[in-house]
Structures are given as structure tokens and as C-alpha cells.
Image (cartoon, rainbow, N blue to C red):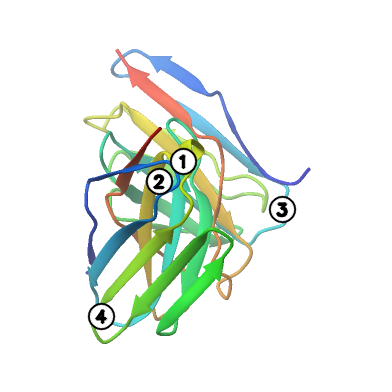
Amino acid sequence: GQSLEQPSEVTAVEGAIVQINCTYQTSGFYGLSWYQQHDGGAPTFLSYNALDGLEETGRFSSFLSRSDSYGYLLLQELQMKDSASYFCAVRVRGGSYIPTFGRGTSLIVHP
Amino acid sequence: DGGITQSPKYLFRKEGQNVTLSCEQNLNHDAMYWYRQDPGQGLRLIYYSQIVNDFQKGDIAEGYSVSREKKESFPLTVTSAQKNPTAFYLCASIADAGREEQFFGPGTRLTVL
């Protein structure tokens, strides 16, 4: 099976930079995704990494190191609206797309 | 606008009753999924369907049933056999197995009294 570990909570101040880490143990790793979920809302897709390195999308970047079984989501210029839960999810090789999600990291942004 | 709809947003049922949660998508996506989310937990897969008239159990399928008679619809029935049904249920879809982005519905919060 697969297992993922994320910190349960991270706090930061508005305007700062924060990094949310995700380590995984899985066989047949294919890629790592990140989702954002506001309280009571639906998760929304942020990014996907299949290869080592950094992917940048506006204020958000995601990094993957396949050799270390590790990835992170980097949020820059934090805004109050970034307060949410962030989930990493692994995809394994195979015909069906069945992601396994981590337990999520609650990001609290203070003014 | 294309998207996934789930209804109702909040649902209350008495213990021992079966209840069906609706999930409809107009994205023309092949694959659909049902997840359960409990406080402080990630998303746990209940059932998924890659094509019409076919579905497979996920990690926590016991006490649940699904059908996929139409491409756009994937209803979930929470049966009386589910020991702890109170949770937030999320439906999702993906265009095809080659894509990475799952699209989620707004969720149904089920409370069993």
C-alpha cells in the first residue's frame, strides 16, 4: 500500500513564505499532486509533479525529489485567503488513476 | 458551466435507514470517485468507476453501494450496515486515466442520528 506523511498544522503571517512537506512510501510511484481545501468546501487541484524539480504556478510552487520520496508545496506572499487545508496525493503506476491522499496540513495565516 | 453537483448539501437520517447521495457531472468525464472525509483526516476512497456499468471497491467500501448506469451519474448509497456513516462525502471525476486533475463536487455532509 501507500502511506503519506504531512505536518498536521502550519502557521505563518501574511506576506511570508511557507513550505508544507510531504513524505511518501509507495511502490510504483508515478507522481505527486497537491490540493487545497477551504473549510467545508471542495478540494481544488493545485499542482502535479512527476519529475524531480520545481514547478511554479503563480504564488504556489511544488517540488519533488523521487530519490528522497519527498515533496513540498511552497506558498509565497501569503494572503489570509490561503488559510486552508492542503493535501498531497500520490499516484502509482497502473491503468486506473487511484490517488492516495495524505491526512492534510491545516495552514493558518495570521495578519 | 461545467462541473460536478452533489445534493443535498446537508442530509440527516435516522440510524438504520439507507440513504442515497447524488452525484452528477456534465464534464463528460470517464472516471468518477466517491470519498469519505472525517475531521482531521484525508480523503478515503469508497468506490470508483472508470466506465459506465463498471465500478470497483476502494479502501472502505463496506456498508456502501454504488451504480453507474449513465456516464454523468454516480450515486452512492449508504446502507444501514455502515457502522459509522456520519461524515463528509465528496464525489470527484477525472477526464481519463492520463489526466492528473481530479474535479470535486461541493460535498454532502451526512449526519445519522
Residue in the foreground of this view, choosing between A76 and A93? A76
Q: Residue at x 71, y 53 (%)?
A: B27
Amino acid carrying mark 4 in the image: Ser
Distance from disc 4 to disc 1, alpha carbons, whole Å, reads: 26 Å
Residue in the foreground of this view, choosing between A10 and B67? A10
User: Do the CB atoms of the residues marked 2 and 1 lie less than 8 Å apart?
Assistant: yes
Residue in the foreground of this view, choosing between B15 and A101? A101
Amino acid carrying mark 3 in the image: Leu
Residue A5 x %, y %: 21, 60
Q: Earlier in the sequence, mark 2 or mark 3?
A: 3
Which chain does tag 3 point to? B
Q: Secondary structure at mark 1?
A: strand
Left or right side of A51 for A72: left
Q: Which residue is disc 3 drawn over?
A: B27
Q: Which residue is disc 2 drawn over?
A: B35
Which chain does tag 4 point to? A
Which chain does tag 1 point to? B
Q: Kindly tell me whether residue B70 is visible in this rendering.
A: yes
Residue B20 x %, y %: 48, 29
Q: Which residue is disc 1 drawn over?
A: B90
Distance from disc 3 to disc 1, alpha carbons, whole Å, reads: 16 Å
